[in-house]
Amino acid sequence: MATFIFPNLLISANSVVFVLLILCSWKKSYAFQGTKSSTDSNDLHHIIHVNALLPSAVCNSSTKVSGLDKKSSLQVVHKHGPCSQLHQGRAKNHLTHAETLFQDEARVRYIQSRLAKNSGSRSDVKETDDANLPARDGSVVGSGDYIVIVGLGTPKKQLSLIFDTGSDITWTQCEPCAGYCYQQQETIFDPSASSTYSNVSCNTALCNSLFSATAGNPLGCESSTCVYDIQYGDSSFSIGFFAKERLTLTSTDVFNNFLFGCGQNNQGLFVGAAGMLGLGRDKLALPSQTARKYKKIFSYCLPSSSSSTGFLTFGKGRGSSKSVKFTPLSKSFRDTSFYGLDITGISVGGTKLSISESVFTTAGAIIDSGTVITRLPPAAYAALRSTFRQSMSQYPKAKKFSILDTCYDFRNYKSVTIPKISFFFSGGIELAIPQEGILYSISVSQICLAFAANDDVSDVAIFGNTQQKTLQVVYDGAGGRVGFATGGCQ
């Protein structure tokens, strides 16, 4: 039998082969998807208490809101959550998880169709110029969206509005509801009771500006008054008069002649909210209409659950954190209302996945406050799912749920260990997804990876609101960038 001599060591040939096999196997286990980061192994996983993955029945009165001046903030509560006075003795009006994800899929298809149609294919701000609006989980409105309360009219009428970075027109239901008005939380806005309301006339530049803000829907007139028509991906819609009114965000932030939609025929899954607050990039969206004061800067933090509070802030100062890291807005979407991102990579448990950047650049990506589950190109999702499943192999699997195909049964566990996930954006930005943004809980026996694959490589990727939970997300429209900071709220 041949032998090999190493310094101070005599080994047989069979022993060498055995050692080499072990070394190769060990090396392979750490290189199955990409390159290992230099992060300490203790920082590669989250340890999560299973009870924390389920809805809380107790109001969290000590909610952390990083950097927020409470004097200029408005409290917004979840209508059926434990912090709401309406919670007791009222029938709950929540969508089921299946309905939420079905509606989410409709929204995603609508966004992707708009972008495919559009493409022809598949500064310094004074710290005093700010306004802060706390935000709450808005599942009460029949969706996975978030709501804030603003004031409209003179005297001011408080209204709960869904805020949406994928929409441009701000609208609310209006009396006399000539067509139809759905049930909402507050009394429906009556323009005849406001001294500052006025309609926009037909055949004017303002009326014509509706064309881009309503995704190209035809303009209309009614008795010489301009009529808007906004359609959403789930067949919801709002039609009514295009008008001017006084908008009150806080006691010190009031805007006269704010352009909005006074809805006379409104149907869809808005039940509970009074309408929509449009935070897109069109000139009729709120950031553009308030640009003189806020310089097209706003930020928000979406709360971790319905028992916690987040915020929506306009302007740079009081809601901003020094730890915000910015990535440039993608040039691929500069002619749309959406905020584009250039994703360059993903890591799971400290391992950078072997995904070509071309996978992300083929269709590009946007960030959207109204999409619940992040959608990824098929190849990117496949790599993410494979690595996540390998890291979670010690836990029993559960059946898939709707668009979520990687689910687990945690009934026999008090805590679980899951790999950390990070996204990489242009400019060298690494964003660690908060632990609240990695899993979507249907029940303790069915808790799923909160990501899904697009149907086709030509479909735009969408960075959804589940992954944004507890992050401070800063939109700097004038500066052409989006920023992120962890620990914005809880």
Image: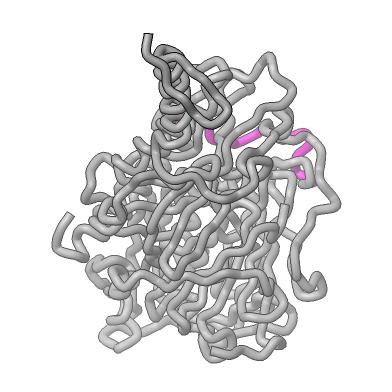
- The reply to whether residue 264 is visible in this rendering is no
Horizontal and vertical percent for residue 211?
Answer: 27, 74
Q: Residue at x 46, y 27 (%)?
A: 23
Q: How is the image coloured?
A: one colour
Provide the residue span drawn in magenta: 85-98
Left or right of 167? Residue 190 is right
Q: Residue at x 63, y 22 (%)?
A: 444
Q: Nearer the viewer, residue 119 or 417?
A: 417
Horizontal and vertical percent for residue 281?
Answer: 40, 74
Up the image or down, 12 lies above or below 376; here it is above
Looking at the rendering, which quadrant does residue 328 occupy?
bottom left
Q: Main secondary structure of the magenta part?
A: loop
Horizontal and vertical percent for residue 13?
Answer: 40, 15
237 in the magenta segment: no
Q: Residue furthest left?
A: 120
Q: Nearer the viewer, residue 303 or 282?
A: 303
Horizontal and vertical percent for residue 313?
Answer: 64, 71
Q: Residue at x 40, y 53 (%)?
A: 345
Q: Residue furthest right?
A: 62
Looking at the rendering, which quadrant does residue 264 occupy?
bottom left
Q: Residue at x 35, y 69 (%)?
A: 330
Left or right of 113? Residue 346 is right
Up the image or down, 421 lies above or below 229; here it is above
Q: How many labels were placed on the picture?
A: 0
87 in the magenta segment: yes
Q: Nearer the viewer, residue 174 or 378?
A: 378
Left or right of 187? Residue 452 is left
- The reply to whether residue 334 is visible in this rendering is yes
Up the image or down, 151 lies above or below 130; here it is above
What quarter of the picture does the N terminus occupy? top left
